[in-house]
Image (cartoon, rainbow, N blue to C red):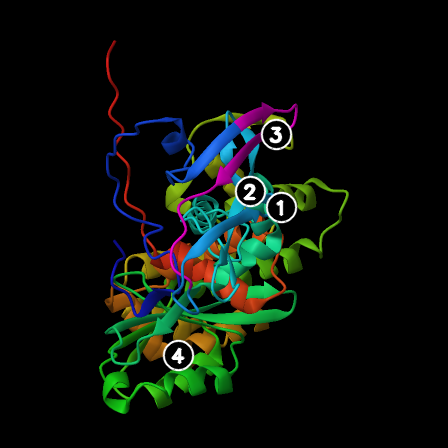
Amino acid sequence: MYEKSPIRLIMKSDQTIIRKNHMELLNNTTDLIGLEDPNLKITFVLKHNTHIEIKAKLDYKPGLCPRCQGQMAKYDFQKASKIPLLDIQGMPTLLRLKKRRFRCRDCGKMAVSETPLVDKNCQISLPVRQKIAQRLIENTAMKDIARDLSVSTSTVIRKLKEFTFKPDFSSLPEVLSWDEFSFKKGRMSFVAQDYHTRQLITILDGRTQAIIRNYFLRYPRKVRASVKWITMDMFAPYSDLARKLFPNAQIVLDRFHIVQHFSRAMNRTRIQIMNEMDRKQLPYKAIKRYWKLIQQDSRKLNHKRFYRPTFRAHLTNQEIIEKLLSYSDELKEYYNLYQLLLFHFQEKRSDLFFDLINETLEAVNPIFQSVFKTFIKVKTKIINAFEQPYSNAKLEATNDLIKVIKRNAFGFRNFEHFKTRICIALNIKIERTNLILSRS
């Protein structure tokens, strides 16, 4: 039922919570509402405006005394326990259950009748606990789960803690993906994932070199030597650390972050040129209004003609670009450079890409110079990005799901709870239920 992953799932209890769908004949109403214990007798049911209340008694023939093995005898009933059940007719349902007490005839020991509906010394029914586990797999806030099932948030948290994920330090994939995500404001967390299977390797409370190093050093050197490629962004400490931890691994920079670097350089250059113009004149307003067209790949411009209020004319995107570039020769020069870099990158022409950088390095402004020097410094890693099919795209999709979990919960105070929710959502696969519709 669970897919094999580097993080193995262990449940402390309720190991059959998520199981294969099966068909079962329900013989009576008690089976339908989950009261399958034949010793449980319903006395009456009350339907209030806000909830449904079921009153029942638990009684059966007494057994032997657990202390002296003497014969137990019926004594009296306990005070009714309040046990929440799953909703009936869309309304919260409460079971008020009176349990029979037994007393040993020899030693006088008292005992209380037990039922599989609830564990001993517990007031939460098993179906509700199973439902909590199922809802935890979804991207639902724990407060919402508690409210929907009429239990406390602490009950949901206790159920969450029953999910434990044991790291497997005996193997690592050949292709690793590294990235980070925001846990709290100003606090980043590290995440590693198998590129091919998209299974989580680890989530760490911090992205410092010490935290990452201490975790991966728990893998034997032979295991770490099996890693061939690591995809990551341009965060410099990652590269230094990866070379030390994985001797045979080559680094592949994420292509999105490479494009992002010279795209930001183009945007900053546009702003610098624009700020030298008169803010009340058309060139300033037009360049500010249509900045996205300057950043867009010129081969993907829309050729449909629309009315443009800024120019008071019907123009295509290409015609707008021509007008914007006519306002500044400097802007035209950097736009052509940016589009040529983008073209060589998308066509995976690494030699022409770096030839263009080397030719224009001394002539461009400091904004582009800084980016070009960075590219030359990490040239080998960028060439790997040209030649290899690997990237951080799959891990970025995982980060989007992590953000959804965090946003739905309005943030997490406890990192371990956050980590467990992520592992549950990503490492547990639910079988699809195929519904069979009958025709009347």
User: Marks 3 and 4: in contact by CB < 8 Å?
Assistant: no
Residue 200: horizontal and vertical position, in percent? Answer: 36, 66
Residue in front for this viewpoint, 173 or 233: 173
Residue 9: horizontal and vertical position, in percent? Answer: 34, 65
Q: Residue furthest front?
A: 106
Q: Amino acid at mark 2?
A: Lys
Seen in the picture, residue 362 relative to 282 is either above or below; the reply is below
Element at badge 2? strand
User: Marks 2 and 1: in contact by CB < 8 Å?
Assistant: yes
Residue 311: horizontal and vertical position, in percent? Answer: 62, 31
Element at badge 3? loop
Residue in front for this viewpoint, 324 or 261: 261
Judged by depth in the image, the label closer to the viewer, 2 or 3, is 2
Q: CA distance from mark 1 to mark 4?
A: 73 Å
Q: What residue is pinned by disc 4?
A: 378
Residue in front for this viewpoint, 88 or 327: 88
Q: Amino acid at mark 3?
A: His
| Disc on res. 51 | 3
Q: Magenta segment range?
A: 44-65
Q: Earlier in the sequence, mark 4 or mark 3?
A: 3
Q: Residue at x 38, y 83 (%)?
A: 216
Does residue 348 appear to the left or right of 393 in the view shown? Answer: left
Q: Quadrant of the C terminus?
A: top left
| Disc on res. 334 | none
Q: Amino acid at mark 1?
A: Lys
Q: Residue at x 50, y 24 (%)?
A: 89
Seen in the picture, residue 199 relative to 75 is either above or below; the reply is below
Q: Residue at x 35, y 66 (%)?
A: 10
